[in-house]
Image (tube, grey):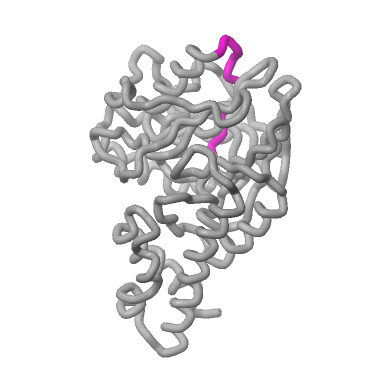
Amino acid sequence: MRFNRREALLGSFCLCCLPRLGRAAAFKVEEVAPGVFIRRGVDEDATPQNRDAIANIGFIVGRDSVLVTDSGGSLGDGLWLRETIKATTSKPVKYVVLSHIHPDHIFGAAAFVPDDPVFIGHAKLRAALEMRGEFYRSKLSEIVGVDQIGPLVRPTLEITDAGEIDLGGRIIGFKAHGPAHTTCDLSMLDRQSGLLLPADLLFVSRIPSLDGSLLGWLAELEALKAMGAAKAVPGHGPVCVDFSQAASDLRRYLTTLRDGVRAEIKQDGSIQQAIKTVAAGERSNWLLFDDYNVRNVTQAYKELEWE
């Protein structure tokens, strides 16, 4: 683990300027294990109405402090979570996890800057933010509004392989994964409850989005399985699921994607042909299938073309 305590922000802002989340009344957290509270994100893409509150986010309460499992997709989403934490416990927020590069998981982090927490991320997250952060910030502001987009938050504690923190009698373990869903996926294991929090390494109901490595994702699913957790909090979908079944469903889709693309390549099929047919039989199993399968096939084709 590498610790850079004060390098959290570009720019500054005051808490009173943070916007409210328009749909906050529709959200609630569920206690999925003792002291573990999760909010289910909506099964949509970012819109002005949902303010990018589409990911499962939440917090873990220890004896001495609180860890935010993921901060949400906008300032308003993050502020809603911060207020929910304060209404639930008087313990201070000491840690905020940035599970990977995607906007729906990181743009709420700025709401927690006044708490002066440690921001935890994969060792490769900082480079990903330098490459994509401002682009994501610009594009998301066009959707949810400039007032919903604050400064980018960088990790101040970087996980290169594995690490852990203590919330006070409650140890949270971290694993930095190889390229999979993205190039900077970080998972967590709450050792007290045995609950796995793999963020977007696990999708349920909503179709997964491939932005790292298809073969790597299949490998990292096996690494998650080796952790031995019975229950998990996916990045999208129900707030707590049976890990074995959920991982099996995801593995089936990713394997179908891999095998279908390989077959097209073997037959000298083009990307255009592949996107018409590969994994079409999975359509009824996933929400937003038509919005993401084409991109997944394209990404997989580029990866597997030169095997």
Give the left or right position of residue 31, taking residue 260 as reference.
right
Q: Residue furthest bottom?
A: 267
Q: Is residue 10 magenta?
A: no
Q: Is residue 157 above or below residue 292?
A: above
Report the residue at 41% width, 30% height from top: 151
| Picture coordinates of residue 83, whole percent (x, y) | 44, 16
In which quadrant is the N terminus drawn? top right
Q: Is residue 7 visible?
A: no
Magenta region, residue range: 89-98
Q: Residue furthest top?
A: 90
* Residue 16 occupies quadrant: top left
Report the residue at 52% width, 80% height from top: 306
Q: Residue furthest right?
A: 169
Give 63 or 77, whichever is nearer the viewer.
Answer: 63
Give 9 or 166, whichever is nearer the viewer.
Answer: 166
In which quadrant is the C terminus drawn? bottom right
Give the left or right position of residue 80, taking residue 100 as reference.
left
| Picture coordinates of residue 283, whole percent (x, y) | 35, 64
Q: Is residue 179 above or below residue 301?
A: above
Report the residue at 59% width, 39% height from top: 121
Q: Is residue 94 magenta?
A: yes
| Picture coordinates of residue 5, whole percent (x, y) | 63, 26
* Residue 142 occupies quadrant: top left
Q: Main secondary structure of the magenta part?
A: strand
